[in-house]
Image (cartoon, rainbow, N blue to C red):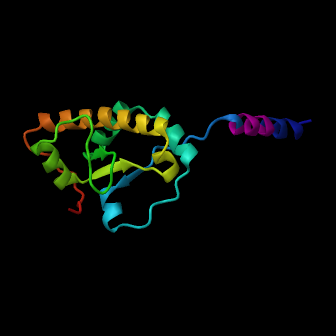
Amino acid sequence: MRILCPVWLITICLLVSACRPPTFGLVYVSNTDVIRGPAPPVLDTNAQMHALKATDPLKEAQLALASRDFRLITTRMPFPVFLGIPEDELVFSARRQYGYKAIASTYELAHNPDFEKLRTDFAQKYNRLIYDFLRTNKELPSTGRAVAH
């Protein structure tokens, strides 16, 4: 009887965990990856859509600031458009100093109106928080990382 209890418990745990949606983080592509980097990773479209729905842009921006990642999010690569913020000197300076990133997409996701709406809303909120942080600093903070221009 002692041998069956652990097997039974393991079986229940496996069944419960198999019913949960996968918990993957949101995948980003950096402008340096597009310019000279390796081939983009194979992207699971279902996992990316789920991650975008589940990720809070304000919390994600706060985590980025805490790790000194001051890159803004664009919805287009390699010619960036930063939604939710003005196109001013601060944005151009931040782009030169830190680079930028995009929420990774596939052909299927790029043509999905739900994904595009989620990505647009996410970028606007995320960029606003990063922009407000950068605007309150007299000088742009250093990341300690080199950025390709």
In this picture, residue 74 sits left or right of residue 46: left
For image coordinates 77% across by 39% down, the residue present is 10
- For residue 96, what is the image quadrant? bottom left
Q: Count the numbered circles shown.
A: 0
Q: Is residue 17 magenta?
A: yes
For image coordinates 20% across by 62% down, the residue present is 149
Q: Main secondary structure of the magenta part?
A: helix
Residue 81 coordinates in the image, percent (x, y)? 26, 46
In this picture, residue 124 sits left or right of residue 22: left
Q: Is residue 6 magenta?
A: no
Please state, as top left, top right, bottom left or bottom right, where the N terminus lies in the image.
top right
For image coordinates 16% across by 41% down, the residue present is 87
Residue 51 coordinates in the image, percent (x, y)? 50, 39
Q: Nearer the viewer, residue 6 or 49?
A: 49
Magenta residues span: 10-18
Q: Nearer the viewer, residue 71 or 62?
A: 71
In this picture, residue 19 sits left or right of residue 73: right
Q: Nearer the viewer, residue 145 or 135?
A: 135
